[in-house]
């Protein structure tokens, strides 16, 4: 399992992200290319990664640290809201995390931090990544025929065993899969039509 920050100062968390997110994303992209999945995400935007916390105390301490004056040059809070009965905070990195090089270069600047689900204990660490499918021209995150068609087309293109539970979400539905990575344990990979930051702007009325 991946190592985690020794404490929850914004500087330590930022160092952790820049150290670990590139290898996390690279490992997922490589695993997706294996014969088990045969999914090529080279041209897809990876719009955010999720860092899970192992306790409500850790969540609160981390979220407060990332909103402190010390963090003002590195993080900005996009939203903190209750989803599924638990608070989830999403931050934007003012300096994106760069991954890869040349034609395979990508960057990620949004980090989702959920508090733990009651009765579902797990270790802190990077937990999932989400990719954006489609051409980026559709702007509404509300579930409709466009989302359904895009997700159905994606699953037809890659006919594996998909988790479709989130296909029926009212906002920004997705399909997902789970994989086991030697350095990160069991992680999720999700595919949706609209980047998380755009969904947040839509929901909060920010232009």
Image (cartoon, grey):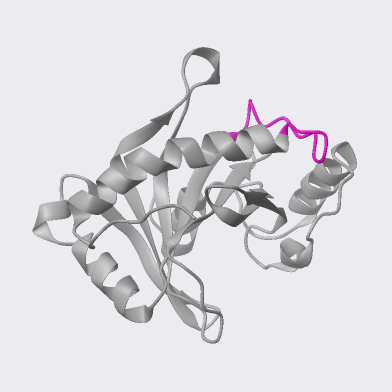
Q: Residue 198: where, in percent of width, then height?
A: 49, 49
- Work out which residue is located at the far left of the displayed protein and give it: 69
- Residue under the point 56% across and 49% down: 129
Residue nearest the observer in this picture, 144 or 174? 174
- Residue under the point 24% across and 72% down: 61
- Residue under the point 73% across and 31% down: 33
Residue nearest the observer in this picture, 45 or 12? 12
Residue nearest the observer in this picture, 191 or 24? 24
Q: Is residue 148 above or below residue 121?
A: above
Q: Which residues are magenta?
A: 33-45
Residue 115 seen in the figure: yes
Q: Does the magenta segment cover residue 56? A: no
Dominant SS of magenta comes to loop
Q: Quadrant of residue 185?
A: bottom right
Q: Residue 138: where, in percent of width, then height?
A: 64, 42
Q: Is residue 165 left or right of residue 121?
A: right
């Amino acid at each position: 399992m991946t190592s985690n920050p020794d404490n929850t100062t914004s500087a330590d968390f930022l160092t952790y992200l820049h150290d670990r997110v590139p290898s996390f994303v690279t490992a997922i992209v490589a695993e997706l290319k294996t014969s088990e999945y045969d999914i090529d995400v080279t041209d897809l935007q990876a719009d955010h990664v999720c860092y899970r916390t192992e306790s409500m105390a850790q969540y609160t301490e981390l979220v407060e640290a990332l909103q402190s004056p010390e963090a003002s040059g590195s993080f900005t809070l996009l939203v903190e809201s209750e989803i599924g009965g638990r608070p989830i905070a999403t931050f934007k990195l003012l300096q994106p995390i760069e991954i890869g090089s040349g034609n395979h270069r990508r960057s990620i600047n949004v980090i989702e931090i959920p508090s733990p689900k009651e009765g579902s204990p797990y270790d802190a660490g990077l937990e999932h990544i989400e990719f954006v499918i489609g051409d980026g021209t559709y702007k509404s995150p509300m579930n409709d025929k466009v989302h359904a068609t895009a997700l159905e087309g994606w699953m037809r293109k890659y006919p594996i065993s998909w988790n479709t539970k989130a296909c029926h979400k009212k906002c920004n539905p997705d399909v997902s899969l789970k994989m086991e990575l030697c350095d990160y344990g069991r992680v999720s990979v999700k595919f949706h039509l609209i980047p998380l930051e755009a969904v947040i702007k839509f929901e909060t009325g920010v232009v």
